[in-house]
Image (cartoon, coloured by chain):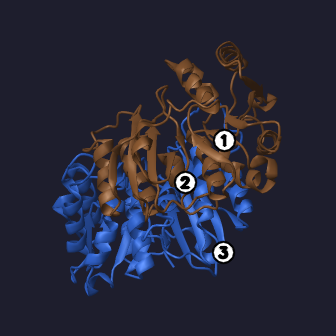
Chain colours: A brown, B blue
Amino acid sequence: MTRIAVCAPSTPITREDAARVSTLAAVEFPGVELVIHEQCFAVEGHFAGSDEARRQAFLECANDPSIDAVWFARGGYGACRIAEDVLAGLTHAAQDKTYLGYSDGGYLLGGLYRARIGRPVHGPMLADVRRDGGEDAVRRALGFLTGARDGLEPSLAGTRHPVVAFNLMTLAMLGGTRLMPGLAGHVVMVEEVSEYLYAVDRLFFHATAHLGGIAGLRLGRVSDVPDNDRPFGADAMQIARHWCERHSIAFLGAADIGHDAANRIVPFG
Amino acid sequence: MTRIAVCAPSTPITREDAARVSTLAAVEFPGVELVIHEQCFAVEGHFAGSDEARRQAFLECANDPSIDAVWFARGGYGACRIAEDVLAGLTHAAQDKTYLGYSDGGYLLGGLYRARIGRPVHGPMLADVRRDGGEDAVRRALGFLTGARDGLEPSLAGTRHPVVAFNLMTLAMLGGTRLMPGLAGHVVMVEEVSEYLYAVDRLFFHATAHLGGIAGLRLGRVSDVPDNDRPFGADAMQIARHWCERHSIAFLGAADIGHDAANRIVPFG
């Protein structure tokens, strides 16, 4: 039996989404026990409960020796407010676990990777069930947590380098903080959603300045770009190439990740 | 005679706005000669001409010994793409000048301050003439450049520390780059516009991690905050206090700066 604990370090999920994923898991993954923490439904302003409530729920899941994996319920924003305190509260039981999420969850994945705690993995979250084709995203996550490897990002098969994947905004915000892992020698994959192209360019200006010594960069999908009052003059791929050239970073092409149901799995390391 | 060169390191202005400010200057500031570089009207995608055109125009203004001040035409986005190359191209003539702007212009102000070139100053730009009360903002800028000191941010009179002012996004993006000045011992003022409060919180998470050792932080106006699908749960002042506390930074209260016509002047240093 694989016991998967779900908590919400950022924003809350609905009971309906939780029930839908629990049913899918019960029907299709008989080897999975899904333990959804009540904190996932808490609401305090923007967040799934106070910083203290979110921190405590994460620690309860991560420090429980009977749990095999901690699955982030949803992104949105908020994990950066608790990540340092979470890391300070982890015990030995947190070491032997997989931590699965993406987007705003990247603050925790990055911090865990820096602290060499557990196995941080970029991949679909519970709330992705809401997307078009979202049940497939959930299947990919639960499949990975029970040993399947067909959901892995395809370029992983061909690289000899350690790999990480981040939302571009999250990676940009991590730079220079106590959560930023050393990424020298890594292939770094980034994706973005709902940002103007000028903001994507700005994030690349910043993020690439913090990526000296990486093995290369891959660009996932940059989706739901809002229309600006004028065209930017370059697409996301051209922007990525521009900033990689400026910082002598090898640009390795596309990555099959993004804020969508097709988002593939990238185990860190 | 004070010769003020105007160039556009970020986005273009209209000939109408330029004419309006030229007329105001001719009528009210007889001691000013305004030299508006043709590059201010260039358009290439998002920008006021290519990176090369913007870089070259800035250098023509900054390296001209007959010019007393370089006034940024407008913000928007783009100065970070040229700032390092601009710094590399400045000559001795660039040293004895004032550089006035804000918002996206902060990348250049920060880089100039780091390189100890000239006198970087946060204050109104030419394009501010478009705002409600914008002619007063232009008068404040031209007044400062001709020796008036009544447009200065009021808290400057009471501080013994060196001071800088930045747009919060710009300061967050500067952190860890080759443009970021050392700000130990400084009072740092920040302001923001058109960002969700969760994004303001995220920017504070990041920016305060790069502000260790500053003398204190002041918060300017955080304006035109879009409505999110739910309330954030804290206002901008509470957000600033939260992150200052996390990083043991003294929070000093409000600053009279912002993306508006009342935006006051803050000479760096």
Q: Which mark is residue A99?
A: 1
| Amino acid bearing label 3 | Ala
Residue B170 in percent (x, y) is at 47, 58
Residue A43 in percent (x, y) is at 75, 31
Q: CA distance from mark 1 to mark 3?
A: 39 Å
For residue B210, what is the image quadrant? bottom right
Residue B263 in percent (x, y) is at 49, 59
Q: Which residue is mark 3?
A: B215
Q: Is residue B30 visible?
A: yes
Q: Kindly state the secondary structure of the residue where label 1 is placed.
A: strand
B26 and A178: which is toward the camera: A178
Tell me which label, 1 or 2, sits earlier in the chain. 1
Q: Is residue A82 left or right of residue A215?
A: right
Q: Is residue B73 visible?
A: no
Which chain letter matches label 3? B
Q: Which residue is mark 2?
A: A173
